[in-house]
Image: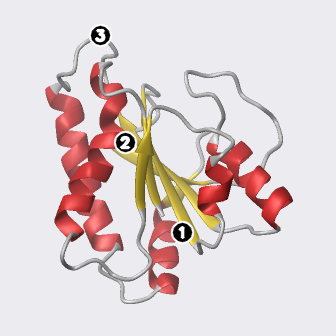
Amino acid sequence: MIYGYGNPGLQDDGLGNELVSRLDEWITGNRSAGIVFDSNYQLNIEDAHAMRGKEIVVFIDATVDERVGDMMVTRVEPDSKVEFTMHSVSPSFVLNLCRNIYNENPATYLVHIRGYKWEFLEAMTPGAGENLNKAIDFFKEALSFPDISGIKGFFDKYSNQLN
């Protein structure tokens, strides 16, 4: 499952949604069985149900974090702590719910795409657009693996931790 979230009406905050939209267009007609795309303004506790039965889940969100160059992949670990951010719950909280409710713990990653402005505009900044294109190329490479273990290995290879 590839799940982008953010608000497209807040400039670069919609990077995750746009990535999902473009990947879905790219893969239409060649879709491998089992690849599911979704996007929303924010993560919700109900997303734990959507994770059920998936071997790998990749969340995509925009970030202002200057430690992120163009984009960064981090491994998500279950966490019961509720973080109060612009998004109602974190990927780690949703994963924790999936584990506790459904006894499932899919390999979960968060792709952070660097954004620059969050004004009430639907236009993405040029820098965020460049970062989005790099993220799309990254996903196309990841999805070129013929099996789930290759995709997991690819994400693990590029996974970092923000300090």
Q: What residue did someone put label 1 on?
A: 156
Q: Residue furthest top?
A: 120
- Quadrant (top left, top right, bottom left, bottom right) of the C terminus: top right
**Which mark lies nearer to you, 1 or 3?**
3
Report x, y in % for residue 74: 55, 52
Q: What residue did someone put label 2 on?
A: 16
Q: Give the side of residue 95 with respect to residue 120, left or right.
A: right
SS category of the residue bearing label 1:
helix
Q: Residue furthest left?
A: 126
Q: Is residue 9 above or below residue 147?
A: above
SS category of the residue bearing label 2:
helix
Q: Is residue 24 above or below residue 39?
A: below
Q: Name which quarter of the figure residue 103 lies in.
A: bottom right
Amino acid type at circle 1 is Asp
Q: Is residue 67 above or below residue 154?
A: above
Callout 1: 10 Å neighbours few (<14), some, many (20+)? some
Report x, y in % for residue 160: 55, 54
Q: Is residue 122 above or below residue 140?
A: above
Task: State the separation of the CA atoms marked 1 and 3.
Answer: 35 Å
Amino acid type at circle 3 is Phe
**Which mark lies nearer to you, 2 or 1?**
2
SS category of the residue bearing label 3:
loop
Identified at 63% across, 45% down, the residue is: 91
Q: What residue did someone put label 3 on?
A: 120
* Residues at discs 3 and 2 in contact (Cβ within 8 Å): no
